[in-house]
Amino acid sequence: MRLEAPERRFLGGTLLLALGVRLAALVVWERLGLTERLGNDPYPHYAEILLGWLPPSPILTHPPVYTFWVAGLYALARAPSPLLVQSVNVLLGTAGVGLFALWARRRLPPTAARVAALWLALDPLLVYFSPQLQSEPLFVALLALFFLGVDSAGPDPRRSDALGLGLLGGVLTLTRSVVTVYPVFLVGSMLWVRRSLRGAAVWLLLFAGWAVPPTLWGLRNLHVHGQFIPLATNGGWTMWEGFTTDRDEVARRPYEMREEVARLGLSDEGDFFRIGRHFSDKLKAFVRENPLAAARIVAGKALLFWRPWVYDPYPVPVRWAAGVYFSALFLLAGFGAWSLRGDPGWAPVWALVINLSALHAVMFTSLRYRTPLEPFLVCLAAQGLTKLLPGARKPGV
């Protein structure tokens, strides 16, 4: 994608803005000690196990790509260095802004694309995760690369494009499992755009490529643990932990689950396969015995996935600010989506929205899990905002 000089200067300024805001967020994050207060996923711990710095233990409760990424950074530093990981995440968060700004240039009118780029640099949710130890910055940057590839390939891709997208999608899946079944939604959206099944066989290469990274990981686990595990073992736990709309129960259930695991004589390390299967079976039994209650929970969780407010432990002013911001974001994004309803290039985005909404109607959900959709919501909101500005041009112009 060739950029003219004014566009290069604008993109460079946007990246500097994004970097400056994220560096400031890192300083605030460290001064307030928020990692200790809010916690983090076990990726840094698993990275030390991979490097042999901690006793051997299974690292199968989360997808492995980010664990290997952290391990690589620790190996470069020759010591556990959370601050190094956070600093690199700041750079990845900035890179994600630049990549999605390039994607927005393809999918939005020029003015809306510029507004989107600036908005991406300042969006509170994207900034919030940049200085953390979590996997969001890496995943969002990879997701941007994937969608740039989808946009370049179009609904009638070459074989090499379909295979390459599939391989990258497999890496995405091993970074965050939320896109495990996305190829079904993606291919469905592409075939819907074409209104024809002619040439659909090429998409089989996308499925084949998508399966390669999880298959390799599964074979590694077959060799190490004696069982083929292509992704992670936390699916059953995550489904049962989050299968409720009662806030008190959400807070209480993980502790109850740990007590249940102890009563069953299981351990988080030695019986990780059985733990996942146990809670998966428990959820299935609940659905069979209480189909109406289960349907109400699924519907409620689908709505909660799109709530504009955050829960505790965040202070009341933060919750109010988030509620106001995300309410405005949703309204503008909805207006922008309506104005783009006839653009077939957005079909893969709608497919991702449906995919994640359906997934988190069953799996555990929180505002964090809407992060992969945040760049697209920002782009849609930028489109909606520019349509509301005086002198906005007609749709499609």
Image (cartoon, helix red, strand yellow):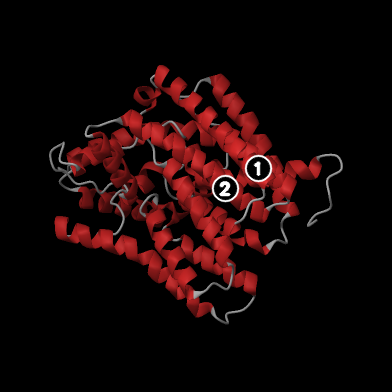
Q: Which residue is mark 1?
A: 116
- The residue at the far right in this view is 391
Residue 103 pos. (x, y %): 60, 52
Is disc 2 surrounded by few (<14), some (14 to 19) or many (20+) residues within 10 Å?
many
Secondary structure state at the residue bearing disc 1: helix
In the rendered view, tell whether residue 155 sits above or below residue 89.
below
Residue type for callout 1: Ala
Quarter of the image where the C terminus is located:
bottom right
Q: From the viewer's perspective, tell me whether residue 320 is left or right of residue 356.
A: right
Residue 46 pos. (x, y %): 24, 41
Q: Nearer the viewer, residue 197 or 241?
A: 197
Can residue 293 be seen? no
Is disc 1 surrounded by few (<14), some (14 to 19) or many (20+) residues within 10 Å?
many
Q: From the viewer's perspective, tell me whether residue 344 is left or right of residue 290.
A: right
Can residue 344 be seen? yes
Q: Kindly identify the residue that appears in the image at 51 percent across and 20 percent down.
A: 315
In the rendered view, tell whether residue 50 sits above or below residue 230.
above
Residue type for callout 2: Phe
Badge 1 or badge 2: first in the primary sequence: 2
Q: Which residue is mark 2?
A: 100
Residue 350 pos. (x, y %): 60, 57
> Marks 1/2: CA distance?
9 Å
Q: Kindly identify the residue that appears in the image at 37 percent across and 51 percent down.
A: 286
Residue 244 pos. (x, y %): 44, 42
- The residue at the far left in this view is 55
The image quadrant of residue 121 is top right
Res 268 label: none
Q: Nearer the viewer, residue 152 or 48?
A: 152
Q: Are marks 1 and 2 in contact (CB under 8 Å)?
A: yes
Q: From the viewer's perspective, tell me whether residue 120 is left or right of residue 301.
A: right
The image quadrant of residue 39 is top left
